[in-house]
């Protein structure tokens, strides 16, 4: 089959073929068929610098779907590209093909043999998910890539991925022992040890053996002899060249030909994996170096001690980690002074004592090498784990650089023999300097693969510099007899170097393999064989022709509208970046597609992906959709159109990404921006208005609660209102109360504004309580409890009220509805009330996380001037305030001991601001309090989200992910949740009345 080069083919419009393909896939499979521009756009990129529009996207439900799709594509002559999590860094998963995404449904462990330590898995299974299942058997699959929470086994096999501990366990190729592939002609190839093959596998093995024999001399002359070599096809399985043999017993296994084939030979339906026992003990020694060169030079000596990992973190990375509040204490625990580099040296095995002895030998070795006192010993698991997380986050930390210059991946995993590492890194650093850039070094010193990405601006002179640096780097690799492609695969950026590395004859041999196994060139054409040039600008995501639309955003995004200078390491002032969208576009472009948001473990990001597993409902998918819209690639007015609306529809605005995304993509704020742009163009819906104006009609509703609560008592009314407003009839709405907090406030002994100022001036304990609409009108008990606690500790408490006697609202409901003008007006009124108090340094205490934290987040980018900064500096959540005061010795009421364990669910915004430790610390002020956290993402209610009929089901699924099961299981525990919506969701889903921490503290005050 002759294809147009899929790298170049960028089909903007549907063709007859693509229409036919979509139609036949829809009729003949059960999978999802996505051929619209936005869906294709979301699959046009991976973690590389490239972008190529696929013909269409297919998400199969099972192997039968895959088989049918391949056959239909073959008949219509549309190439096929298999894809996992799409975290490849070299453009392996982009191409003008039918992309088949196996990550959503093809993710089962098909068989597990604990005795033999083998597992058979589907290709879309994520490594961490496999290892979670293996843990109880004392086993793991040890190719521990940094993307272990996202990377699929199929993708890892496709790229021949390598983990931090490859010196001990090898790469994918050393740990996969069998594979089942669907070939283009519908045959199934069962790969395994060559002795036992039959059918297509036996034929293929015979072909490759003959080819390898014919090229033996070439193989011996050109094959890099380093352990990290992933370029080309593994033609050397019959004449192994690596310092680590493919198999322990020297037998040949045909499977290894397909590892690292990058999807070019067939679709992997199943993989047989060899598992390893989980090491019982691990110890870590962190060696501190005053010079980078010494660190590099020492690696060759350290590996002789038999470590399971030797990983580098250089000075820049250390400084970047130090600048991150979450990583700072961790990295500092590993440092002695201010080193230029550290090496993380891990030893693992069965016996801790033996490992401790080896750790001691490391200390002796470093002293012998002239570096006494350079090792920080970490014999315990918790600090080790924390430090590994920092190392694993290395690349992502680096990618958080603002401006158009970004660290670019293209020579980042050249591998050289260890004895040349110091010379190689020094020479490459010089190359960077000559080209006016610099690179940060990190990763696998144990195997001579150091990651480094020079900072280049692909919109300007990046491509030319990339070519020049690659040429010079390749000369160094050749000089030191290394491998140009050592870890992340070939894809688009290293394909052209295969011929350079192996020579024309071996390159022709690779072509022969491709032709034999995929004669119709169906799978990923122009990859590995006949690849395009790496610097072909038509393939770039940000080519020099990249432009963004003109846009006046409602928020201030100027912090992103900057340029950086790699040589001086400086970043220009806010607003200096020349962005036609005043920084909004550049904030969106911070997403580098690394896929970190496809995670299911700790943290919040991204609840909608966790329940849907759809690229569209993932932070990355949303950022890509916005980027395409802002750059005009989805047509005119796309920002306010259906594709963007749909991509943002299930974003609950939890801000999980603001904290968990390594480059700080804040989709919650971006969604507000889009809502505002949309409203400006299209106006508001009735539902938007109902929700936005809730604080305005709340005082009226509380005067006639029986009327406003009627809807909760009548199914017919609820259904009618659902039709009218979109609010779900399946939900109880919050119950209006006549006895609001504001109405009861006069009887609580609160102090006037003047009395507060006087108390504060006299050095007495004083605080402003700012109540939100929700706690005021629906759960006044929360605010009452807060007053009780503060007064019990001796505080003069003043309730913030506006001139009309009402408590001003923060305006968040207007922000959510996109009404920025109304939100600003509300914000100004609130600031007017609070600023004079904040100016005097009086703390402003709030109870509802989303409302209070709006003062510290959105207010700062709404053009509200200095008042916003002044108030933000004094605005504290109730527990933050209490813990601060308790630590200063000013908060010591008398307590009753706790009798029930406490289980805390954090509001997403509390988590996003890193405030959960404070909540736990506040609760622990109660004597005997046993406090633990529920490891949960968003509760699913998220303001009005869960009340909407269109979101009810997704909302409940989010809650059922972790929160509701945990709450139900904790029968005798007190459930603590500060968010009004979270408490509502817990009540709806588990019939349990969760409490705000203020209520818990008040209940434990001694009479
Ligand atoms: C921040 C970051 C850190 C990284 N760290 C590491 C690291 O430590 N070590 C490392 O080796 N890599 C690393 N990578 C690269 C990447 O994460 C790994 O290569 C990973 O294993 C790819 O898995 P994936 O599921 O994303 O595969 P994808 O990117 O989706 O696919 C990878 C290749 O496999 C092919 N493929 C996928 N599924 C199939 C199938 N069913 N049949 C046939 N072919 C298939 C694809 O066509 C493609 O060629 C890193 C990437 C990032 C962004
Ligand atoms: S949104 Fe953040 S975490 Fe997700 S892919 Fe983009 S940069 Fe990575
Ligand atoms: S705000 Fe929450 S739901 Fe929205 S993209 Fe970020 S993590 Fe996902």
Image (cartoon, rainbow, N blue to C red):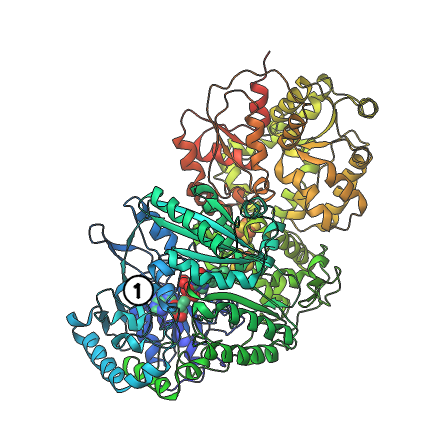
Asked if residue 812 is positioned above or below residue 996 in the image, the reply reads below
The residue lying at 59 percent from left, 78 percent from top is: 463
Asked if residue 137 is positioned above or below residue 647 in the image, the reply reads above
Residue closest to the eye, 800 or 199: 199
Read off the residue under disc 1.
174
Q: Is residue 150 visible?
A: yes
Ligand 1, seen in the image, is in the quarter at bottom left
Q: Is residue 151 visible?
A: no
Q: Is residue 700 left or right of residue 955?
A: right
In terms of secondary structure, where does tag 1 sit? helix
Q: Is residue 106 left or right of residue 634?
A: left
Residue closest to the eye, 541 or 506: 506
Please identify the quadrant where the N terminus is shown.
bottom left
The residue lying at 56 percent from left, 39 percent from top is: 907
x, y (%) of residue 664? 60, 54
Specify few, some or many for label 1: CA neighbours under 10 Å numbering under 14, 14-19, or 20 or more: many
Asked if residue 716 is positioned above or below residue 206 in the image, the reply reads above
Residue closest to the eye, 223 or 174: 223
x, y (%) of residue 48? 51, 69
């Amino acid at each position: 089959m002759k294809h147009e080069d899929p790298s170049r083919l960028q089909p903007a419009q549907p063709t007859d073929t693509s229409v036919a393909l979509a139609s036949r896939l829809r009729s003949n499979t059960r999978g999802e068929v996505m051929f619209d521009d936005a869906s294709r756009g979301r699959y046009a990129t991976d973690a590389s610098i490239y972008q190529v529009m696929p013909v269409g996207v297919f998400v199969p439900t099972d192997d039968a779907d895959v088989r049918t799709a391949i056959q239909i594509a073959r008949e219509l002559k549309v190439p096929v590209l298999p894809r996992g999590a799409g975290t490849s860094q070299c453009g392996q998963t982009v191409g003008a093909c039918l992309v088949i995404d196996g990550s959503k449904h093809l993710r089962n462990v098909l068989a597990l043999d604990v005795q033999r330590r083998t597992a058979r898995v589907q290709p879309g299974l994520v490594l961490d998910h496999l290892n979670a299942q293996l843990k109880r058997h004392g086993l793991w699959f040890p190719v521990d890539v940094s993307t272990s929470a996202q990377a699929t086994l199929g993708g890892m096999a496709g790229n021949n991925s390598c983990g931090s501990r490859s010196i001990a366990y090898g790469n994918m190729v050393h740990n996969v022992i069998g594979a089942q592939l669907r070939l283009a002609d519908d045959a199934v190839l069962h790969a395994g040890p060559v002795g036992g093959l039959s059918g297509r596998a036996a034929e293929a093995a015979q072909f490759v053996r003959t080819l390898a024999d014919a090229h033996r001399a070439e193989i011996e002359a050109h094959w890099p002899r380093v352990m990290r070599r992933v370029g080309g096809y593994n033609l050397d399985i019959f004449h192994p060249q690596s310092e680590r043999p493919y198999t322990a017993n020297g037998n040949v296994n045909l499977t290894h030909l397909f590892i690292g084939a990058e999807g070019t030979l067939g679709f992997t339906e199943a993989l047989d994996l060899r598992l390893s026992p989980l090491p019982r003990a691990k110890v870590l020694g962190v060696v501190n170096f005053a010079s980078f060169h010494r660190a590099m030079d020492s690696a060759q000596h350290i590996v002789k001690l038999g470590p399971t990992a030797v990983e580098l973190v250089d000075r820049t990375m250390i400084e970047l980690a130090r600048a991150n509040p979450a990583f700072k204490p961790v990295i500092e625990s590993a440092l002695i002074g201010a080193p230029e580099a550290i090496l993380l040296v891990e030893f693992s095995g069965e016996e801790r004592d033996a490992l401790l002895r080896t750790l001691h030998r490391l200390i002796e070795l470093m002293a012998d090498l002239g570096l006494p006192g350079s090792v920080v010993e970490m014999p315990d698991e918790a600090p080790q784990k924390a430090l590994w997380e920092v190392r694993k986050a290395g690349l992502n930390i680096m990618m958080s650089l603002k401006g158009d210059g970004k660290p670019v991946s293209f020579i980042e995993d050249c591998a050289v023999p260890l004895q040349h590492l110091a010379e190689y890194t020094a020479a490459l650093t010089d190359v960077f300097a000559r080209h006016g850039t610099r690179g940060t070094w990190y990763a696998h010193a144990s195997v001579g693969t150091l990651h480094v990405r020079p900072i280049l601006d692909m919109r300007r002179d990046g491509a030319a510099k990339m070519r020049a640096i690659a040429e010079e780097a390749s000369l160094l690799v050749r000089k030191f007899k290394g491998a140009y492609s050592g870890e992340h695969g070939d894809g688009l950026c290293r394909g052209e170097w295969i011929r350079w590395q192996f020579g024309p004859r071996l390159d022709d041999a690779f072509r022969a393999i491709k032709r034999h196994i995929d004669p119709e060139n169906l799978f990923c054409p122009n990859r590995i064989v006949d690849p395009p040039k790496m610097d072909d600008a038509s393939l770039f995501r940000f080519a020099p022709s990249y432009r963004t639309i003109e846009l006046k955003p409602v928020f201030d995004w100027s912090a992103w509208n900057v340029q950086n200078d790699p040589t001086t390491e400086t970043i220009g002032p806010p607003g200096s970046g020349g962005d036609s969208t005043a920084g909004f576009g550049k904030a969106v472009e911070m997403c580098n597609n690394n896929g970190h948001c496809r995670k299911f473990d700790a943290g919040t990001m991204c609840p909608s992906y966790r329940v849907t597993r759809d690229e569209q409902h993932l932070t990355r998918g949303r950022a890509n959709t916005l980027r395409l819209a802002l750059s005009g690639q989805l047509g005119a007015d796309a920002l306010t159109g259906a594709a963007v609306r749909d991509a943002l529809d299930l974003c609950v605005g939890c801000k999980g990404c603001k904290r968990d995304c390594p480059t700080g993509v804040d989709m919650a704020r971006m969604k507000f921006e889009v809502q505002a742009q949309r409203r400006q163009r299209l106006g508001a819906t009735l539902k938007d208005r109902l929700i936005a104006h809730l604080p305005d009609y709340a005082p009226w509703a509380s005067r006639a609660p029986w009327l406003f609560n009627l809807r909760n008592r009548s199914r017919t009314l609820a259904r009618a209102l659902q039709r009218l407003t979109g609010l779900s009839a399946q939900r109880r709405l919050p119950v209006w109360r006549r006895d609001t907090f504001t109405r009861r406030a006069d009887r609580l002994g609160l102090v006037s504004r003047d009395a507060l100022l006087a108390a504060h001036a006299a050095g007495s304990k004083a605080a402003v309580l700012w109540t939100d609409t929700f706690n005021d009108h629906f759960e006044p008990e929360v605010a009452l409890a807060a007053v009780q606690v503060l007064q019990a500790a001796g505080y003069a408490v003043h309730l913030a009220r506006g001139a009309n006697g009402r408590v001003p609202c923060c305006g968040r409901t207007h922000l959510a509805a996109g009404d920025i003008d109304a939100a600003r007006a509300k914000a100004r009124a609130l600031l007017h009330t609070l600023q004079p108090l904040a100016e005097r340094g009086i703390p402003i205490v709030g109870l509802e996380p989303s409302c209070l934290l709006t003062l510290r987040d959105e207010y700062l980018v709404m053009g509200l001037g200095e008042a916003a900064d002044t108030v933000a500096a004094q605005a504290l959540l109730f527990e933050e305030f209490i813990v601060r005061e308790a630590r200063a010795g000013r908060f010591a009421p008398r307590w009753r001991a706790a009798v029930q364990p406490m289980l805390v669910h954090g509001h997403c915004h509390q988590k996003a601001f890193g405030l959960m430790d404070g909540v736990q610390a506040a609760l622990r002020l109660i004597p005997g309090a046993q406090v633990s956290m529920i490891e949960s993402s968003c509760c699913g209610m998220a303001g009005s989200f869960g009340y909407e009929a269109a979101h009810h089901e997704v909302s409940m699924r989010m809650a059922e992910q972790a929160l509701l099961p945990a709450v139900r299981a904790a029968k005798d525990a007190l459930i603590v949740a500060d968010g009004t919506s979270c408490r509502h969701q817990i009540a709806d889903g588990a019939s349990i009345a969760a409490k705000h921490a203020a209520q818990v503290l008040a209940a434990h005050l001694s009479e």
